[in-house]
């Protein structure tokens, strides 16, 4: 298995957009854009974010293909990690490997991670990487059209 993280380039956004169109992926992630099918808005947003100094984004390459993305962004002065793996790459440990490798590159701490409380796979990725659950809150999940419990993790 060939695995690496590389700097995200604008052409990667096309693959990221297609990955996030999957209904099952959206349901699992829960906290998605209002309209995942709006390609123009998606590409504009992520192109802008690629040029934001507070964002550290890497593209996940698996066997010479783009498998997903992992990134650190800042919200209200706090660093958070986010990741998305294309559905066809699920179940191969890629998310865990990507987060572990990314955390060696991204040194800012503390860093937070969040997941829908029923997204056991994402929670497992965070826990395997050393994140500790510090709480939960009810938040509106666009993909589900309702408020759901979101668990909050922290890595020091």
Image: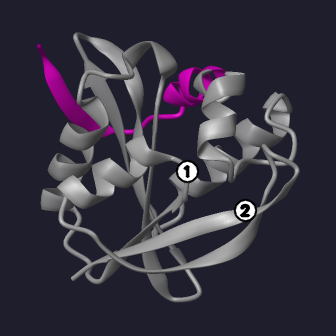
- The number of numbered discs placed on residues in the rendered structure image is 2
> In which quadrant will I find the C terminus?
bottom left
The residue under label 1 is: 118
Front residue (pair 140, 5): 140
- Residues in magenta? 1-18
> In which quadrant will I find the N terminus?
top left
Q: Earlier in the sequence, mark 2 or mark 1?
A: 1
Q: Quadrant of residue 96?
A: top left
| For residue 91, above or below residue 150 | above
Residue 146 placement (x, y as % from top left):
86, 57
| For residue 44, above or below residue 81 | above
Residue 130 placement (x, y as % from top left):
18, 66
Residue 126 placement (x, y as % from top left):
31, 57
Colour pattern of the rendering = one colour
From this viewpoint, is residue 70 visible? no
Q: What residue is at 23 percent from the left and 36 percent from the top? A: 5
Residue 8 placement (x, y as % from top left):
40, 39
Q: What residue is at 39 percent from the left and 22 percent from the top? A: 90
The residue under label 2 is: 148
Q: What residue is at 46 percent from the left and 63 percent from the top? A: 55
Front residue (pair 143, 149): 149
From this viewpoint, is residue 51 visible? yes
Left or right, 102 with reference to 18: left
- The residue carrying pointer 1 sits among few (fewer than 14), some (14 to 19) or many (20 or more) residues within 10 Å by Cα, namely some
| For residue 42, above or below residue 54 | above
Q: Is residue 54 magenta?
A: no
Give the numbered dot on residue 74. none
| For residue 113, above or below residue 90 | below
Q: Quadrant of residue 59?
A: top left
- Looking at the image, do the residues carrying marks 2 and 1 touch, with CB atoms under 8 Å apart? yes
């Amino acid at each position: 298995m060939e695995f690496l993280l590389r700097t995200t380039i604008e052409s990667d956004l096309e693959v990221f957009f297609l990955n996030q169109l999957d209904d099952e992926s959206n349901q699992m992630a829960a906290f998605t854009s209002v309209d995942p099918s709006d390609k123009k808005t998606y590409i504009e947003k992520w192109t802008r974010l690629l040029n934001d100094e507070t964002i550290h984004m890497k593209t996940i390459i698996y066997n010479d293909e783009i498998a997903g993305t992992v990134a650190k962004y800042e919200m209200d002065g706090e660093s958070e990690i986010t990741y998305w793996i294309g559905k066809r790459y699920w179940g191969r440990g890629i998310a865990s490997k990507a987060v572990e490798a990314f955390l060696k590159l991204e040194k800012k701490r503390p860093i937070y991670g969040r997941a829908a409380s029923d997204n056991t796979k994402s929670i497992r990725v965070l826990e395997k990487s050393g994140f500790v659950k510090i709480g939960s809150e009810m938040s509106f999940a666009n993909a589900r059209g309702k408020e759901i419990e979101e668990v909050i993790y922290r890595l020091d």
